[in-house]
Amino acid sequence: MFRSSTSLANNFCPLKWALGIHQGSVFIMDLEVSFDKRIEELEVINLYKANSWSSAEKPKELLAALKNSHSLVTAREGGVLIGIGNAISDGHLVVYYPHMLVHPDFHGKGVGRKMMETFRLKYGNFHQQMLTADGEAIEFYKSLGFERAGQTAPMWIYAGTEH
């Protein structure tokens, strides 16, 4: 488990760090970010619906997909799920981050950044880290060091209308 801190660089501990962020009307006192596959269907579906992701319409498949990922990172505030992300990987060279969601009330509060920092502890030295970003997420991922891969274009066969 990781706890974030306003003085992250000075107080970094690989297992925990203490946090207190105040931005806007949301005060994050007890943010816990960890590799954790202990998730409940209702909390996951509520988070996906809050972000308007169509995966919420397939709860059984979504939960199975998340739990069977190579890694799953959760962000909890006072025990409440406010963020989730998963990684699919060969475990050695390549990792793909297909889902990364933070509840809209916590956007811009550092939660997604802490989640990606947690993933980078495990996958930071991999040869290739990939994701697909759209909308406002593009600038967020650029701020974390991700960039467009040459002249590549994301392509998919997709049965949904949103994410």
Image (tube, grey):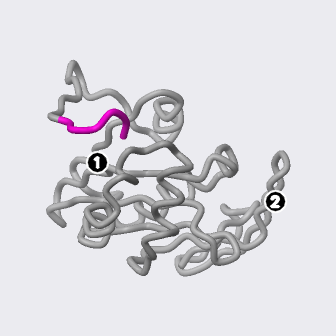
Q: At which x and y percent is residue 115?
A: 51, 59
| Amino acid type of the residue tagged 2 in the rendering | Phe
Q: At which x and y percent is residue 76?
A: 60, 70
Dot 1 corresponds to which residue?
129
**What is the total number of numbered labels drawn onto the structure image?**
2
Main SS, magenta region, reads loop
**Residue interval drawn in magenta:** 158-163
Identity of the residue drawn at 76% across and 60% down:
6
Task: Tell me which corner region of the image, top left, top right, bottom left or bottom right, holds residue 89.
Answer: bottom left
Which residue is at the far front? Answer: 57
Q: Secondary structure at mark 2?
A: strand
| Amino acid type of the residue tagged 1 in the rendering | Gln
In the picture, measured across the screen, residue 70 lies left or right of residue 59, that is left
Nearest to the observer: residue 90 or residue 86 = 86
The reply to whether the C-beta atoms of the residues labelled 2 and 1 are less than 8 Å apart is no
Identity of the residue drawn at 52% across and 68% down:
43
Query: Residue 159 magenta-drawn?
Result: yes
Identity of the residue drawn at 49% across and 42% down:
52
Q: At which x and y percent is residue 163?
A: 36, 40
Dot 2 corresponds to which residue?
27
Query: Residue 46 magenta-drawn?
Result: no
* Residue 108 numbered mark, or none: none
Relative vertical location of residue 17 with respect to residue 28 in this rendering, above or below: below
Identity of the residue drawn at 41% across and 61% down:
119
Label 1 crowd (10 A; few <14 / some 14-19 / many >=20): some
